[in-house]
Amino acid sequence: MSSRSTWRGDELAERLEITERSVRRDITRLRDLGYPIDSVTGPYGGYSLAAGGRLPPLLLSDDEAVSIAVALQQIAHRSSVSVAEGAMSALTKLSQVMPTSLRERVVAMSSVVVGVGSAAVDGALVEAGEIESLMGLAVACSRIERVRFDYRSGEGAETVRHTEPFRLVSVGQRWYLVAFDIDRADWRTFRVDRISRLRNTGARFQRGEVPDAAAFVAEGLAVNSYEQRATIRIDAPLDIASREIPPTIGIARADPDDPARTLVEIGGDDDWVARFIVGLPLPYEVIEPASVRAELRRIGRRLIAENRR
């Protein structure tokens, strides 16, 4: 009916093969649902759909519905409490009107996704192929079902992994799977955009002791993925220091010898670590390595030389 802006009642009745009385009843029902329908009497009158009004029911494809569900999940983990509550409420309503197959995937996302911080990480936006992996992994986490998948490392090496999936962790624009790697008998983190050919095995398993998924991913990003790490002591309690150091940059914990101070581990080379901590608005001391202290002195000498006037 979008081919014309205005239709007479008798034309609609003929086109839809119903009576004009049914047309009037359906128009009333559409208005009740929030569709702003204008009507004009007379020989040149008829019905037309106006702009605005309350949001009417939406018709979504499976891919569109899944994409909205993923977006609502990201909003819920990166927003204020009020916005997050609205996002989760919308997600619940969306799942209620979905087909059973889609509903399971969306409900699974609601139950197995956790977030880390609010700072974005450089990376690609979620692509269609990644959404499929996300949803498949979410269902496997929810069902407690083992999965196999092909995985490409950061160096490009291809391996086949057999895992017991646990949680999906959202960090900025990237997603990570926390799973127990059966062949390596240890917990591992996998970037979802590097996962392909996801295969459900149908094999259920019983969970043993599980890690804090968000902390596990954060520690991997901040420390474990680097060959070198530095330890600094900040002259501020943990709650204050944590505001200045994102969990994906450094792992902070209270100093066991002095709870009024904080110990922080940061991964990276001397130059990167020094440039980060030199910008901290809190007093600090580099405990190790000595090479970071040397880099700080070099930066200090350069700043003094460039700002003598």
Image: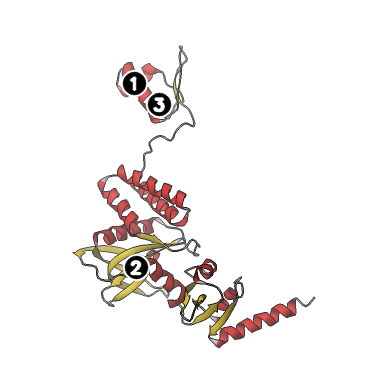
Q: Position of residue 20 (x, y in %)?
A: 33, 17
Which residue occupies 58% across, 78% down? 284
Above-or-below relation of 166 to 230: above
Q: Position of residue 235 (x, y in %)?
A: 56, 76
Identity, as a three-letter code, of the amino acid under mark 1: Arg
Dot placed on the residue nearer the N-terminal end, 2 or 1: 1
Residue carrying label 2: 178
- Select label 2 or label 1 by which is in front: 2
Dot placed on the residue nearer the N-terminal end, 2 or 3: 3
Extreme-left residue of the structure: 203
Dot placed on the residue nearer the N-terminal end, 3 or 1: 1
Q: Is residue 95 visible?
A: yes
SS under mark 2: strand
Identity, as a three-letter code, of the amino acid under mark 2: Val
Above-or-below relation of 16 to 251: above
Residue 31 — which label? 3
Which residue occupies 38% across, 71% down? 216
Residue carrying label 1: 25
Which residue occupies 30% across, 55% down? 108
Tell me where residue 214 sits by quadrant: bottom left
The crowd level at tag 3 (other Cα within 10 Å; few <14, some 14-19, many 20+) is some
- Of residues 39 and 204, the one nearer the viewer is 204
Identity, as a three-letter code, of the amino acid under mark 3: Arg
Extreme-bottom residue of the structure: 290
